[in-house]
Image (cartoon, rainbow, N blue to C red):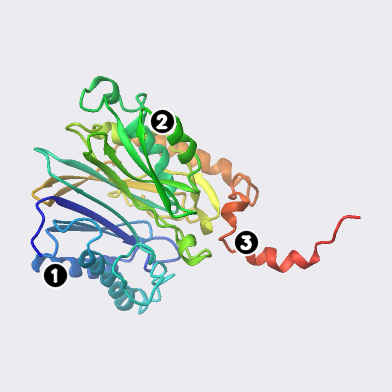
Amino acid sequence: MPLKQKTTISVIKADVGSLVGHHITHPRQLEVARQHLEQARKESLIVDFHVTHCGDDLELIMSHQRGENDKEIHELAWNTFIDVTEKVSRPLKLYAAGQDLLSDAFSGNVKGMGPGAAELEFEERVSDPLVVFLADKTAPGAWNLPLYKIFADPFNTVGLVIDPSLHSGFTFEVLDTHEGLSIKLKCPEEIYDLLALIGDPNRYVISKISRNDGLPAAAASTSKLSMIAGRYVGKDDPVCIVRAQNGLPAVGEVLEPFASPHLVPGWMRGSHHGPLMPVSYSDSQNKCTRFDGPPRVVALGFQIANASLVGPADLFDDPAFDKARAKANDLADYLRLHGPFVPHRLGPEEMEYTTLTGVLEKLKNRFQKIQ
């Protein structure tokens, strides 16, 4: 088929096994994944790639010109995850080998099969900066608050007020993860309707954002493993793509929401609330050790040039975010004091898909009616 002229960025991730519990990927896993994507680049399936990780998640960042939801791109990612699992994770007995691979055979798209995917197709601008956010030990709803701040909150993004190219606002596509439905809301006109939904990040998650004239601005993964498997099979660990500058929020505005760590679901056994800590990749702070966390986010910046990935820049590798990291640790201390009690433990609706259900099932016949 003829290649499209637009550029597509595909970020596809999976937890296919980790070193010492839910801690960190093994270097050999990254090496095998790079071999797969290098071969795909030689065959011109993709233009460029970057293989990385956040905590125990293997992340494939690929640029190509085949559009979103392309079968061959998704199959490349799926086969890469399978090969890493069989060649590295299982022989080394890495923990939870192949955890996110919930099917035995590829069905045309990784969505609904376990891995998470965020994709954005666009016409390149004269200069096209782009930020890829990678999170670990949390769920897709973790992006709701920062994406709202980036694209709808003038107290975060002053460009919404003073930049004519942003002044008309942005349209948010929101997914109802319980019903499999989506809705588009135009802001600022429908900002209160948007908040009514995304204030519940367990059910409603932002999947796409575009400028109100149609310019693609952001995309986020929305897969919830519990919704696919019907039970707890691991954390969702979402990814997100945000374009910046030149008629979109500046890079500094894109990063600013993470200067104040907000509480997200996930953490230990996917059953606790914790602060989302911004960490750098270069100093290896994206290892998840304390109570398997706390939840964290890495920000990698790229310039997109003729579908090539120039970078990355490690955007949270900045002492300006030290205070956010310290505050996240303080919040983690406070929440840990609650142990198995809410609000540290998730509410009952979110716990329905965790291992707690086995305990409740064992006890249910011992309850007696109050006389």
Of 255 and 162, the residue lying toward us: 162
Three-letter code, disc 1: Gln
The CA distance from mark 3 to mark 1 is 44 Å
Residue 98 in view here: yes
Residue 359 coordinates in the image, percent (x, y): 67, 65
Q: CA distance from mark 3 to mark 2?
A: 36 Å
Q: Quadrant of residue 11?
A: bottom left
Label 1 sits on a secondary structure element that is helix
- Residue highlighted by disc 3: 356
Q: Residues within 10 Å of mark 2 (few under 14, many from 20)?
A: some
Q: How many marks?
A: 3
Q: Can you give x and y, in whole percent of width and height, for residue 49 in the image?
A: 17, 58
Amino acid beneath label 2: Ile
Secondary structure state at the residue bearing disc 2: helix
**Disc 3 marks which amino acid?**
Leu
Choose mark 3 or mark 2, whichever is in front.
2
Q: Tell me the residue at 30%/34% (across/down).
A: 170
Q: CA distance from mark 2 to mark 1?
A: 45 Å
**Which is nearer the eye, 193 or 337?**
193
Whether 317 is drawn above or below 138: the answer is above
**What residue is disc 2 on?**
191
Regarding residue 256, the answer to whether it shows in the image is no
Residue extending farthest to the top is 162
168 displayed left or right of 309: right
Identify the mark at residue 39; answer none if there is no mark. 1
